[in-house]
Image (spheres, grey):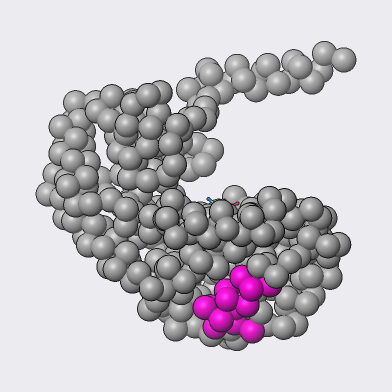
Amino acid sequence: MEAFPQRLRALLDERHATGLYRQCLTLESAQGPLVRLDGRDYLNFCSNDYLGLAAHPRIVASLREAATTWGVGSGASHLVCGHSAPHRELEEALAEFTGRPRALLFSSGYAANTGVLQALLKPGDTVLQDRLNHASLLDGGLHSGARFRRFAHNDCDALARRLAQAEGPTLVAVDGVFSMDGDSAPLEELARLCSEQEAWLMVDDAHGFGVLGANGAGSVAAAGLNETQVPILMATLGKALGTSGAFIAGSELLIEALIQSTRNYIYTTAMPPAIAAASVTALAVLREEAWRRDHLGDLITLFRAGAKALGLPLMASTSAIQPLLVGDAGQAMLLSQRLREQGLLISAIRPPTVAAGTSRLRITLSAAHDSAQVERLLATLGDLWPHA
Ligand code: PMP
């Protein structure tokens, strides 16, 4: 009887002993460039609200209005009676926006990735994944029953070798923009390799969707790749779009088959209809307010130039994710703590999220920031870095 409590205590002790114990912050305000925590305002450089839409007045108004019409909960899974007009409208808008015939909603990106890979793959298939893919892609591949192999990060030669050895129907899955490094996958080259070997390519564009490409349609659109080259496109709604949930976009055949077989779609409550309605509005705002992408691009340039001048350990990222490599987990925690004392909220990312010895500060920029706030970030980093 004591086995489980003992195991849990051992787990917590181990996390404390290795300095890797994790704790939630409890915010006392909405997302934005400034957030309130323990009664104090902090400059927020750790959210994925890349375009500053999470508290956009028009999107908030749309959510409020939709809740009046559609209520709060969806009441059931999509296939029972939880699918309502706002869900349908959002799926159609996302299909149109991504240039794909159909889109299918999921309640989270984690559910979409694990669900799709488990629905699609069978024993005897091969799934090949970039080593730095998001946990949800890795978990979906690992639990799919297919032969699961990783390849070195963004290394097309390594993928080519894996493809040459692959057996059975083969699927290659990558992040479009890598969540902890901020760099982009070489999508054109990956698509070429996949088409040569008749493998399917799946791109998780959680961090590119809304930000990259003309109109913000994402990494795949920016690389000019169509539905034949990237048959499975996944993106989340809780980052640049500022709402919550995720979708898979692809062919009629793919989406119909997923509806029939994806357990994470079939056996779960549909996202609240008001969130779907707010997401339709967010998609319109994202298209109309192109200045947000331009401004974010300017802030990224400003940050990188300033950090370079200060000699900070920038990584090879041109996205809104601008990590600074620290190495040691304890040192990364200390820096995060010192920044907090100076009124800046920036999280330290440590193992097991990243490899041992590559702990980092994951700085994220948003169109909601102004250049003075980025200057303040740089000045504080410059003061702290050598002395932390
Ligand atoms: N894919 C990537 C690349 C992500 O970074 C995340 C979330 N951080 C997810 C999937 C999961 O999305 P969600 O938060 O909607 O579950």
> Considering depth in this image, is 165 or 116 the residue closer to the camera?
116
Left/right placement of residue 94 relative to residue 313 reads right
For residue 190, above or below residue 332: below
Question: Whole-percent x and y of residue 188?
Answer: 45, 79
Quadrant location, the N terminus: top right
- Residue 338 is at least partly visible in this image: no
Quadrant location, the C terminus: top left
Left/right placement of residue 387 relative to residue 61 reads left
* Residue 281 highlighted magenta (yes or no): no
> Considering depth in this image, is 41 or 357 the residue closer to the camera?
41
Residue at (19% x, 52% y) in the render: 371
Residue at (57% x, 74% y) in the render: 94
Q: How many marks?
A: 0
Question: Whole-percent x and y of residue 271?
Answer: 68, 56
> Considering depth in this image, is 250 or 351 the residue closer to the camera?
250
Residue furthest toward the left? 309
- Residue 386 is at least partly visible in this image: yes
**Rendered image quadrant of residue 208:** bottom left
Question: Whole-percent x and y of residue 77?
Answer: 80, 58
Image: magenta residue range? 88-101
For residue 160, above or below residue 13: below
Question: Whole-percent x and y of residue 179?
Answer: 46, 53
Residue at (53% x, 19% y) in the render: 16
> Considering depth in this image, is 12 or 57 the residue closer to the camera?
57
**Rendered image quadrant of residue 339:** top left
For residue 135, above or below residue 343: below
* Residue 93 highlighted magenta (yes or no): yes
**Rendered image quadrant of residue 248:** bottom right
Q: Main secondary structure of the magenta part?
A: helix
Residue at (79% x, 20% y) in the render: 4
